[in-house]
Structure formats: structure tokens, C-alpha cells
Image (spheres, rainbow, N blue to C red):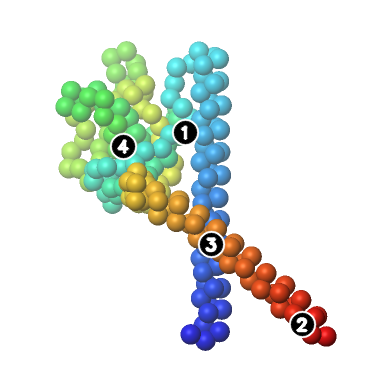
Amino acid sequence: MNKELLLKIKWWGNFVLTIIMNSIVVMLLLIGVLLLVYYVDVMRSMKTGNDHQPLFQAYVIISQSMEPTIHVQDAIIIKREDDLKVGDVCTYISKNPSYLGILITHRIIGITNGPNGEKLYTFKGDNNFSADSMPVEKDQIYGKVIMKVPKVGYIQYFLSNAYGWIIAVVAPCVGIITFDIMKLVRIKRLKRRRKGALNEK
């Protein structure tokens, strides 16, 4: 293998590793910011005594009911929202006996007033033929979908396995350590060559 090819492989390897490391740093920063906002919001709620959902939450979609808008294994970020409108995609907790306690992410297709003047929301999955069977009250709604991250669920599943954790975390660390060791060896060789050249003079 010639020297130019080795240099190209090394350059591309460093380039790909840099992109991966920077992506990880950005993701960790975003997660850190979301966790900080979540913590501050929860602490504020505890101090004021307001019992409401956190400002931001994230979930992985496991059903096809919102396709093609949201696919299975897509991650969604939801934000607590008071002003909900027809067309908004929201996550709510079901009171339907068939799906009791299940979180559902569907689209609002209608808003009506209940017997006591409270708002009742009718939801429907984009991929479903009919609307959800029971109207939803405001306190059941966790928040409005503000962001979709495609296929993050596969990464979550991958990392939940031992081999996935090893490949995603341990392998890059070993790669970085190996690269640093190779750099140190190269520096030592250069120093020896320089010393040898000086001694010859």
C-alpha cells in the first residue's frame, strides 16, 4: 500500500471520527439543556404547588397510527401547551378502558365544549380510518409535538443491548486511545531520528 493512499485513509478516518465526536457533543449538549429546563420546571412546579406536566418531554413512537407524518421508531419532543388548535399533533393519556393509561400521539380534528363548559378534544391518527372513540379532556394532554427526530428509536434499542453499548461507547474510546498511542510512538520515533542525525554531525 503506497504512502499517498495511507495518508488519504488516515485523513478520512480523522474526518469521520471528528464528525462523530462533534455530533455526540452536540447531542449531549442538547440533552443537557433539555434536562436542565425539565429540572427547573419541575422545581418551580413543586414550589408553586402547580400540578402540571413538565414543559418538555420526549417519546418514541411504536405504532403506525400517525404515518406518514410520524413513523414507527421516530422520536418526538412535546411541549406543554395551553392554546391547542385543530390540526395540532399532541400526546395524551387515554382513559378508554381498552387503552387505559396508554400514551397516544394523534392529531386534533375537533374541539367542543362539555356539559360544564370545559373543552373536549377529538383526536384521530393520520393513518386511522376513524377518530378516537372517546373525547379527551385538557388535563389528559401532555403536550404538543414540536419536533420529530427520525429513527431514534432504533438507536435506543441498539444501545439497550450489551453489544450495542460496547460498539457505540467502548469501541470509539478504544479507537481514540489507540490513535493517541500511535501518535506518541510516531513522536518518539521522530525524536530518535533527530537525535541520530545530530549525533552523526
Query: Could you tell me the amino acid type at mark 2?
Result: Ala
Q: CA distance from mark 2 to mark 3?
A: 29 Å
**Disc nearest the viewer among 4 and 1:** 1
> For the residue labelled by badge 1, is the local secondary structure a helix, a strand or a loop?
strand
Q: Extreme right residue here?
A: 201
The reply to whether discs 4 and 1 touch (Cβ–Cβ < 8 Å) is: no
**Disc 3 marks which residue?**
178
- Residue at 31% x, 42% y is 61
**Disc 4 marks which residue?**
105
Whether residue 85 is visible here, answered yes or no, is yes
Task: Give x and y (percent) for residue 95.
Answer: 24, 23
Q: Earlier in the sequence, mark 4 or mark 1?
A: 1
Q: CA distance from mark 2 to mark 4?
A: 71 Å
Task: Give x and y (percent) for residue 51.
Answer: 45, 17
Q: Earlier in the sequence, mark 4 or mark 3?
A: 4
Q: CA distance from mark 1 to mark 2?
A: 64 Å
Task: Give x and y (percent) for residue 43.
Answer: 54, 21
Q: Residues within 10 Å of mark 3 (few under 14, many from 20)?
A: few
- Which image quadrant for residue 181? bottom right
Task: Give x and y (percent) for residue 49.
Answer: 50, 13
- Residue at 56% x, 26% y is 40
Above or below for 120 versus 187: above
**Disc 1 marks which residue?**
56
**Disc nearest the viewer among 1 and 2:** 2
- Residue at 45% x, 52% y is 170
Of residues 177 and 119, which is closer to you in this image?
Answer: 177
> For the residue labelled by badge 3, is the local secondary structure a helix, a strand or a loop?
helix
Above or below for 23 versus 153: below
> For the residue labelled by badge 2, is the local secondary structure a helix, a strand or a loop?
helix
